[in-house]
Image (spheres, rainbow, N blue to C red):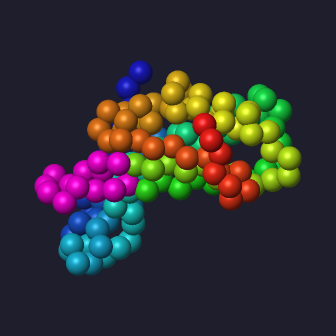
């Protein structure tokens, strides 16, 4: 199964990308010649990673009957200094908040996403070191 996006240049360094029926505006910052009207392309790689992993984790936890929690992720890409500038390390943090959250189920859900289900994780792991961290109520959990 193929995935296709169509990206049109709309002026300066601004592009409109049609992604599965949704428009995403991509732009550069003013110092690079853009107008900061949308995210940068490399940052969208991190968005793809968090979206893919997040959907996996929420789906897995639902099957495990884990409820009543809030959840967010943070992805931080550390870049090289030479061109082409790429992420050499990506730290992906999963942050859960709630009462009496089952640590074992959360760790298992994150591990299944990272090691088995999330294609974005696997693709980015081929290009960069991927570090995964899990926090429950602001306390880092051993994996």
Which span of residues is magenta-colored? Answer: 77-89
Q: Position of residue 18 (x, y in %)?
A: 40, 48
Q: Is residue 128 in the magenta section?
A: no
Viewer-proximal residue, 98 or 23?
98
User: Would you say 7 lies left or right of 44 here?
Assistant: left
Q: Is 98 located above or below residue 37 in the figure?
A: above
Q: Position of residue 61 (x, y in %)?
A: 73, 35
Give the position of the N terminus as an image quadrant.
Answer: top left
Q: Is residue 5 visible?
A: no
Residue, far front: 142
Q: Position of residue 36 (x, y in %)?
A: 35, 73
Quarter of the image where one finds residue 83: bottom left
User: Would you say 44 lies left or right of 56 here?
Assistant: left
Residue drawn at 26 percent across, 73 percent down: 34
Residue drawn at 66 percent across, 36 percent down: 107
Residue drawn at 60 percent across, 37 percent down: 143
User: Would you say 46 lies left or right of 54 here?
Assistant: left
Viewer-proximal residue, 95 or 53?
95
């Amino acid at each position: 199964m193929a995935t296709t996006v169509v990206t049109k240049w709309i002026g300066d360094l601004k592009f409109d990308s049609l992604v599965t029926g949704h428009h995403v505006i991509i732009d550069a910052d003013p110092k690079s010649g853009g107008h900061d009207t949308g995210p940068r392309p490399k940052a969208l790689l991190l968005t793809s990673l968090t979206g893919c992993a997040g959907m996996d984790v929420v789906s897995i936890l639902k099957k495990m009957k884990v409820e009543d929690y809030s959840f967010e992720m943070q992805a931080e890409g550390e870049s090289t200094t030479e061109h082409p500038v790429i992420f050499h390390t990506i730290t992906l943090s999963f942050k859960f908040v709630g009462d009496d959250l089952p640590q074992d189920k959360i760790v298992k859900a994150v591990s299944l996403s990272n090691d088995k289900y999330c294609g974005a994780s696997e693709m980015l792991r081929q290009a960069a070191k991927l570090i995964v961290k899990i926090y429950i109520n602001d306390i880092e959990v051993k994996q």
